[in-house]
Image (tube, rainbow, N blue to C red):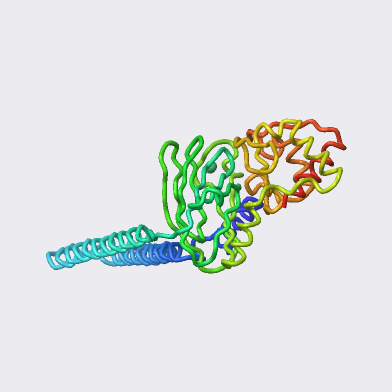
Amino acid sequence: MRAAAAGTALLLAGCGRELSSVNPAGPQAERISDLTWYLTATGTAVFLAVTGFLLYAVWRGRRRAESAAGPAAERTLTRWVAGSVAATVVILLATLVYNFYVGRSLADFAEPGALTVRVTGHQWWWEVQYQDPVYSRRLTTANEIHVPVGRRIRLEVQSADVIHSFWAPNLHGKLDLIPGYGGTTYFRADRPGVYHGRCAEFCGLQHAKMDFLVIADPPERFAAWYDQQLRAAAPPADSVQQKGQQVFLGKGCVMCHTIRGTPANSRVGPDLTHLASRRTLAAGSLPNTRGHLAGWVVDPQKIKPGARMPPNQLASDELHALLGYLQSLK
Ligand code: CUA
């Protein structure tokens, strides 16, 4: 009973606004959505027709069991079989042509001046780099991709370890991240919103906790976000944050993370320069609150067993200071 309820909830969640391939927010997703509906409708019609004919044949067969089949009955049968084969060929051909057309039109979105975002899949998080032609305007963040509404995004993907798959169904179909190969596609968000995405290729223990957000904002808001993200981290504003920064730089954190504007400059884990501006922690695993952040910093393995981040033993005043500092990284 509980399993059935959970299954239903899952199905309904699949139709939710935030992670849905039939609630398109851009032209690419719209074509995929149309194709999805076409396939669903065709499949349903074929299923109903075949079931109908089958039931009819059973019913008729019973009635006619006694009368021997003559040449006339055989001719009728041949006509039915030929008609069914013809209908099958027509339906499959139409599907093939439509499918081909959708594939072509999705590939037809290259455009100069697109905003290039490079996404690197890691076990189990997403590194996001904005490839501005001006080097000083390049930007690295994690797990949250902000895009301006109405502008074409050139998405370049790569993997740092195993095969992942980038899937934000409201915006586009899946794109695999294959080690050693680059992948490219284009998408565009036509209305503002927060679109959920997740890894769609099994990639190890925490595959299920490898989510991301695509946040589409009006161009001015996106520009403001971008300029904010370009800034180095604000220096500690009080003695607690000061101490928190020392904890960050003195304990293990500095070995894996970057905070621009400080000596922390490692790219093993996510860039934390503006950690506090993000909505989630650990690739969509947790809401970004002080309590969840504390739990994550102290024992990531409890939340995401197998994650590359080790537990951190901190005195309570150290943890308090570290949280104060991390939460100041707006
Ligand atoms: Cu990455 Cu599944």
Residue 139 seen by the camera: yes
Horizontally, is 172 left or right of 62 in the view? right
The vertical placement of 228 against 295, above or below, is below
Depth check, front residue: 211 or 217: 217
Q: Name the residue nearer the viewer: 150 or 73.
A: 150
Q: Is residue 58 visible?
A: no
Is 267 drawn above or below residue 4 in the view shown?
above
Quadrant of the rendered image containing residue 62: bottom left
Q: Position of residue 44 (x, y in %)?
A: 40, 64
Task: Give the percent coordinates (x, y) of residue 316.
Answer: 86, 36
User: Residue, x 51% and y 52% (percent of image)?
Assistant: 134
Which quadrant would residue 64 be assigned to in this image?
bottom left
Place of residue 87 in the rendered image (x, y in percent of width and height, measured from the top left): 25, 65
Count every numbered label the image shows and give the total.
0
Question: Which residue corresponds to the image point at 67% horizontal and 51% vertical from the top-left?
Answer: 280
Residue nearest the viewer, comparing 74 with 6: 6
Residue at the (76%, 31%) spot, across then down: 250
Question: Foreground residue, 91 or 63?
Answer: 91
Say above or below: 6 vs 120: below
Say which residue appears at 84% left-offset and 36% top-offset. 318
Q: Is residue 141 left or right of residue 59?
A: right
Residue 37 in picture, x, y percent from top left = 42, 66
